[in-house]
Image (spheres, grey):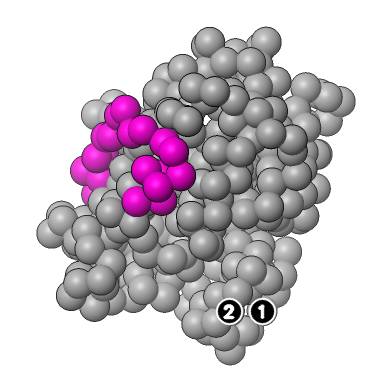
Amino acid sequence: MVNPNLKDLLFWTFRRNETDVINLYDYLSSIMQVATSGNMLNFGYWKQDTRDPVAAQTNLCDIIGDISDLKNAKNLLDVGSGFSEPAIIWKKKYPVLDISSLNINQNQLRFAKQLLGNNKNLELVNSTATTIPFRESAFDRVIALESAQHFKPLDKFVQESSRVLDKDGILCIAIPILADSKGPEILKIGILKFTWSSEHYDFKTVERALVSNGFKITRKEIIGDMVYPPLADYYIKNRESIKSRIIQKYPAYVEKILYRSIQKMKEVSEKGIIQYVLIKSIKSH
């Protein structure tokens, strides 16, 4: 794990080139592991009976698997795969599915390799999402589970997805978005502008990237209400126990920033300034 000072964190956040994002996520993903006691890096989908973040994260993996129709798939490319925990879940549920987990972050891939142990059914690939090292038509599914907000340019990722997908292949994206990235909303997200180390895309930007690269959007689900407020409520309710775990490994100011971000996330979600969208698109030509 990277152990930066506050100056490093601010510098990575403002400049946010490819190396900076890797460094940030080496740091932030470890915090998420500590806070959730799990190895997934998504916000999760919180049903009425969901009790903890890992269960919510597993829910989101299951939903994405259903939307992507993985039961009828043969070859899946999971782009921005984190620690490959979602891929492990999908492999258990769909055992005949061949999965390649692509991640630019070598440290996360090393950890994923430890999780896999002797399980050789998942291929781990170190690469950027905008230059995918596979032949044309190698896959019938591409998934970006809460990772596409980091890909820039997004258009290049979609182009590459189209290239490696076969005819009628499915690209499924789960992504946090702004209601309008060009309007005044970008000024209303406050601390999230800095603590969400992503590109702050809106739906029109994502839609344009898909349609202009030969994809037809066949399903769109707005699920922000099932993501942000219940996650924030969980953190607020359990803050003391989460805080005690975090400050064992991180400076106290890190937890304070995280807590303020969680509060702001709930506020701007309830005002409709941020959303979370699931998109199923089919390669149409």
User: In the displayed image of the protein, which residue is found farthest to the left?
Assistant: 271
Location of residue 169 in the rendering, given as x and y in whole percent from the top left corner: 52, 25
Q: Determine which quarter of the picture holds residue 190.
A: bottom left
Amino acid at the residue labelled 1: Pro
Residue 88's image quarter? top right
Is disc 1 placed on a helix, strand or loop? loop
In this rendering, does residue 136 appear at all? Answer: yes
Give the mark nearest the N terminus, 2 or 1: 1
Q: Distance of mark 2 from mark 1, alpha carbons? A: 10 Å
Q: Nearer the viewer, residue 219 or 283?
A: 283
Q: Is residue 95 above or below residue 260?
A: above
Name the residue located 46 percent from the left edge and 44 percent from the top edge.
213
The percent position of residue 221, horizontal first and vertical second, equals 27, 34
Q: Position of residue 161 (x, y in %)?
A: 57, 40
Q: Which residues are magenta?
A: 208-229
The disc label shown at residue 4, or none: 1
Does the magenta run of residues contain 227? yes
Residue occupying image coordinates x 36% and y 60%: 201
**Disc 2 + disc 1, Cβ < 8 Å:** yes
Q: Is residue 171 left or right of residue 193?
A: right
Query: Type of residue at label 2?
Result: Trp
Provide the residue designation for mark 2.
12
Residue pushed farthest front? Answer: 285
Q: Measuring 41% from the left and 75% from the top, which residue is drawn there?
A: 194
Is residue 84 positioned above or below 154 on the image? Answer: above
Nearer to the camera, 193 or 168? 168
Q: Position of residue 158 (x, y in %)?
A: 51, 46
SS class, disc 2: helix
Q: Would residue 41 be visible to someone looking at this image? A: no
Query: Residue 116 magenta-drawn?
Result: no
Residue located 66% across and 12% down the image: 95
